[in-house]
Amino acid sequence: MIEQAVFWMLGAVMIVGALGVILLPNTINSVMLLLLSMLALAGIYVLMGAHVVALFQIIIYIGAVLVLFIYVIMLLNLKEQGLKLPMQTFTYIISGFSLGLLVVVVWLFWQSLWGTTFTGGAGNLKASATVHQLAVDLFSQHILIFELTSVLLLVAAIGAIIISKK
């Protein structure tokens, strides 16, 4: 019962965050709402028992890609366009939701690590692959995709350096 409530709450947060990314004119607030949506997605992964995918979501997408987005926005010096609410108020609202969602994700991760099984819904899904099996699969069958992703990140870093030199 609580797992379904958490699932629906995380889904609603993801939808609201995605709509905020599209509808807000301020780019920094859009990136913060993207952060909120990605945290909610990581929470759903933890709820499903896919801990490795949740960690990848947090480390790679939230830790690297969003930092790159913020870096590019600050580098391009994009100005606010017609924001009616004061920046501080909206930032505090988004930060509060992000902090609450982070607490939910940590709680779900903690519960799943210490043997608490979820009953009903998506909580019955078990991660059948271990980290070793995932690594073998990643570096054998999906090596081309893995290498193309690393080349893409390298090109993005080089592009950011070239833009910053101008």
Image: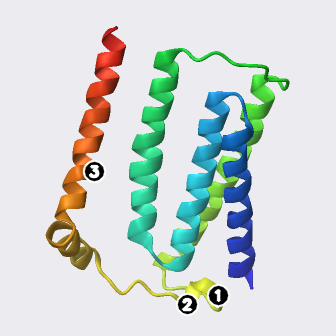
- The residue identified by callout 3 is 149
Q: Split into 4 quadrants, where in the image is the C terminus?
A: top left
Pointers 1 and 2 in contact (C-beta within 8 Å): yes
Q: Residue at x 18, y 60 (%)?
A: 144
Task: Judge by depth and name the residue closer to the eye, 165 or 61.
Answer: 165
Q: CA distance from mark 3 to mark 1?
A: 33 Å
Element at label 2 = helix
Q: In the shown orientation, is residue 83 left or right of residue 99?
A: right
Residue 120 to residue 21: above or below = below
Q: CA distance from mark 1 to mark 2?
A: 7 Å
Question: Crowding at label 2, few (<14), some or many (≥20) Cα neighbours within 10 Å?
Answer: few
Q: Residue at x 57, y 65 (%)?
A: 43
In x, y percent, where is residue 118?
Answer: 60, 87
Q: Split into 4 quadrants, where in the image is the N terminus?
A: bottom right
User: In the rendered picture of this protein, how many numbered marks are placed on residues?
Assistant: 3
Q: Which mark is residue 121?
A: 1
Disc 3 residue type (three-letter): Thr
In x, y percent, where is residue 99?
Answer: 66, 49
Q: Is residue 106 visible?
A: no
Q: Residue at x 45, y 26 (%)?
A: 71
Tell me the quarter of the picture where residue 32 sits.
Answer: top right
Residue 23 to residue 106: above or below = above
Residue 159 to residue 75: above or below = below
Q: Which mark is residue 124?
A: 2
Q: In the shown orientation, is residue 141 left or right of residue 82?
A: left
Q: In the shown orientation, is residue 27 left or right of residue 68?
A: right
